[in-house]
Image (spheres, rainbow, N blue to C red):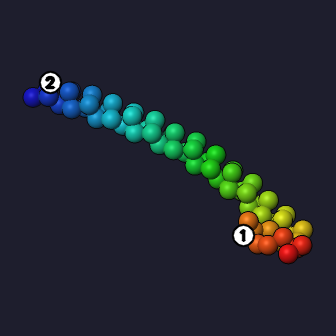
Amino acid sequence: MTQALEEQIAHLTRTVEELSDVVAKQDHELRAISEMVEVLAQRTRTREADGGIVLGDERPPHY
């Protein structure tokens, strides 16, 4: 009985460590993505303040 409990505790401990690593990696990725979103949002605000965004499907002014 004791050996079975020790094996289960060892398995659960390993699982918790693996999940902790996954959460740490996701936190790192989420922070990087959040920084990218903030940079893109700032660019958008700057472009809008400078006169708007030119979309790819708009005709150039010489048409």
The spot of residue 35 in percent (x, y) is 69, 50
Residue 48 in view, yes or no: no
Disc 2 marks which residue? 3
Asked whether 24 or 7 is in front, the reply is 24
- Could you tell me the amino acid type at mark 1? Asp
Q: Which picture quadrant has residue 1?
A: top left
- Could you tell me the amino acid type at mark 2? Gln
28 shown above or below 61: above
Q: Which picture quadrant has residue 4?
A: top left
Asked whether 48 or 7 is in front, the reply is 48
Q: Which element carries disc 2, helix, strand or loop?
A: helix
Asked whether 39 or 60 is in front, the reply is 60
15 shown above or below 57: above
43 shown above or below 27: below
Q: Which element carries disc 1, helix, strand or loop?
A: loop
Residue extending farthest top = 3
Instruction: Answer few, some or many: residues within 10 Å of disc 2's Cα (few below 14, many 20 plus, some between 14 and 19).
Output: few
Disc 1 marks which residue? 57
Q: Is residue 11 left or right of residue 23?
A: left
